[in-house]
Image: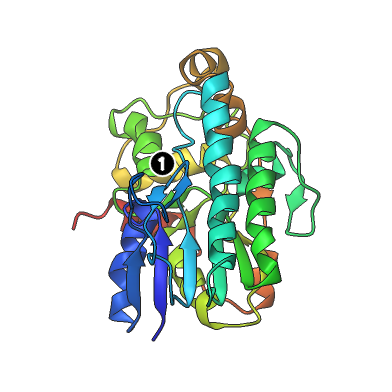
């Protein structure tokens, strides 16, 4: 049994971990807030005031907190995204390292956005990182997490968009299909990485206990699909046609700002090489069964 502290414990992934880990015998400790009147509390821009003792005597810290990256990007929004990942993670790591008994494992979220827009290139953990504002955020995020490596085992999870029941990203993508106006976005030829919630939870639970789990991992399903094929698969699962012409880029750029270029139109053909080398057994390796489970009514 491990004592596991989770930041971002009320988010989509954090909520599922908080549900699953106790069934495996672990104790989950949501990182709770203190207040500015307590002289021992430390200020973290994303977490607020961390109460003294909230992170004492834990075995694992799973760091998921960060500003929602899916809203419209402005200069101010980009700065908030960077602060909530780079600066907040750095402050959290400094706090953990100052403890009398720091945790043994620090598992930090990252994102496949670190590779940028790469067209048809097959990307693994050995590939160079890309360029662009989302790359800058992810790179700074991972660098802040890596500061913990001097005193604990660090695992950085380069997460693809997470599918599953009530997943926000999937709900947004599926809305046009459900409304009978489904079609590809942009050219539709861009590669669209994805991963199912059950596999993210499984990877994290394995990383908690296996000391050979260290460094960066692409947490993406092995079934690479293009945007147009993802939309068609949604149509088959939902019983809807997907015959609309491609959505032009301009309206989406007007709606979402430059975020559209890095999260909607970017092409990332990513292989989970390090997980495959470990012999990881996928819960949901194929897109259509994963979508069926995601859209299945509870």
| Quadrant containing the N terminus in the rendered view | bottom left
Residue 99 drawn at (x, y percent):
53, 70
Q: Is residue 282 visible?
A: yes
Q: Nearer the viewer, residue 151 or 9?
A: 151
- Tell me the colour scheme of the image: rainbow
Seen from the viewer's position, the closer of residues 271 and 262 is: 262
Q: Is residue 95 left or right of residue 234?
A: right
| Figure quadrant of residue 105 | bottom right
- Identify the residue at horizontal 30%, vertical 53% (top origin): 165
The kind of secondary structure element at disc 1 is helix
User: How many numbered discs, if any?
Assistant: 1
Residue 28 left/right relative to 200: left
| Residue 281 can be seen in this image | no
Q: Position of residue 78 (x, y in %)?
A: 57, 28
Structural crowding at the residue carrying mark 1, measured as other residues with C-alpha within 10 Å and reported as few (<14), some (14–19) or many (≥20) = few
In the foreground, 139 or 237: 139
Quarter of the picture containing the C terminus is: bottom left
> Which residue sits at x=46%, y=46%?
43
Residue at image position (48%, 73%) is 60
- Above or below: residue 215 compared with residue 256: below
Residue 87 quadrant: top right
Residue 27 image position (x, y, % from top left)? 33, 77
Vertical comparison of 289 with 3: above or below: above
Q: Outermost residue toward the left?
A: 298
Figure quadrant of residue 293: bottom left
Residue 25 in percent (x, y) is at 32, 84
Residue that numbered label 1 is attached to: 169
């Amino acid at each position: 049994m491990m004592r596991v502290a989770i930041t971002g414990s009320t988010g989509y992934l954090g909520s599922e971990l908080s549900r699953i880990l106790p069934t495996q015998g672990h104790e989950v400790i949501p990182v709770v807030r203190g207040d500015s009147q307590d002289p021992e509390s430390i200020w973290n821009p994303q977490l607020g005031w961390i109460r003294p003792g909230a992170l004492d005597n834990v075995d694992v810290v799973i760091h998921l907190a960060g500003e929602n990256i899916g809203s419209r990007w402005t200069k101010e929004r980009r700065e908030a995204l960077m602060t909530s990942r780079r600066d907040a993670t750095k402050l959290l790591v400094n706090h953990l390292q100052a403890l009398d008994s720091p945790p043994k494992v620090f598992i930090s979220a990252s994102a496949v956005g670190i590779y940028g827009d790469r067209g048809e290139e097959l990307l693994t953990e050995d590939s160079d990182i890309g360029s662009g504002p989302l790359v800058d955020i992810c790179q700074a995020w991972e660098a802040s997490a890596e500061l913990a490596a001097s005193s604990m085992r660090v695992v950085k999870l380069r997460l693809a968009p997470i599918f599953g029941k009530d997943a926000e990203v999937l709900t947004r993508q599926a809305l046009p299909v459900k409304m009978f106006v489904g079609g590809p976005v942009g050219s539709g030829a861009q590669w669209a990485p994805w991963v199912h919630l059950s596999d993210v939870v499984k990877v994290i639970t394995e990383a908690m206990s296996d000391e050979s789990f260290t460094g960066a991992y692409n947490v993406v399903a092995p079934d690479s699909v293009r945007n147009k094929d993802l939309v068609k698969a949604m149509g088959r699962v939902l019983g809807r046609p997907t015959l609309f012409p491609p959505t032009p880029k301009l309206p989406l750029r007007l709606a979402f700002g430059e975020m559209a270029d890095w999260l909607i139109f970017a092409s990332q053909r990513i292989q989970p090489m390090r997980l495959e080398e470990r012999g990881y057994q996928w819960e949901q390796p194929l897109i259509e069964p994963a979508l069926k489970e995601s859209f299945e009514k509870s």
